[in-house]
Image (tube, rainbow, N blue to C red):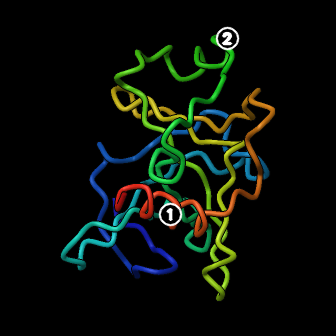
Amino acid sequence: MVAETKFFGTIDIEDDKIIHFPMGIIGFENLKNFALIYDSEREERSKISWLQSMEEPLMVFPVINPIDIMEDYAPIIEDELTKIIGNPADADILIFVTMSIPSDITKMTANLKAPFIINTVDRKAMQVIVENQDYEIKYNVYDAIENLKAKEGE
């Protein structure tokens, strides 16, 4: 499928790379098909990817695997909700959270409260509001990464 994108221009996405959101995503329920795009021009793969709408070229979300910013991220999701995406086994789930990236990167945040849950086998996904009370909507990513780097350097 040929897709117009905001940041990458016109790109060709293989049909088996399209992720279907049966219920859309929060605030954009009419958008159902997305693809994860990685910046492949870099030597080392960036931790930040892009969730690009296949229906709306300007609709793209920077996303990150929450484990990259919070080692013990373990969202509590009702089992009933995962039926929508085929009740995947834990090994077949990929989780991403949206990011807000302002010009001052020290203020970069991630929404840990509303992750995207992707069934990697069926390529179905959904965005959920997790039950974890301690997960923030604006979790400071810059501070988290700096803390993880300091911890690794110990």
Q: State which quarter of the image contains the N terminus.
A: bottom left
Front of the two marks 2 and 1 = 1
> 38 or 154: nearer the eye?
154
| Whether residue 101 is visible | yes
Which disc, if any, is residue 145? 1
Residue 151 x/y as whole percent: 43, 55
Residue name at image x 58 percent, y 41 percent: 116
Hey, which quadrant is residue 24 in on the image?
top right
Residue name at image x 36 percent, y 32 percent: 120
Residue 111 x/y as whole percent: 69, 52
Hey, which quadrant is residue 117 in on the image?
top right
Furthest-left residue in this view: 43
Which disc, if any, is residue 126? none
Relative to 114, 16 lies left or right: left
Hey, which quadrant is residue 83 in on the image?
top right
* Residue bearing mark 2: 80
Location of residue 91 with respect to 70 vertically, above or below:
above
Residue name at image x 33 percent, y 72 percent: 39
Amino acid type at circle 1 is Ile
Residue name at image x 51 percent, y 67 percent: 146
Relative to 143, 90 lies left or right: left
Decide which of tag 2 and tag 1 comes sooner along the chain.
2
Could you say whether the residue bearing mark 2 is in a helix, strand or loop?
Answer: helix
Q: How far apart are marks 2 and 1 (CA)?
A: 33 Å
Amino acid type at circle 2 is Glu
Residue 33 x/y as whole percent: 52, 48
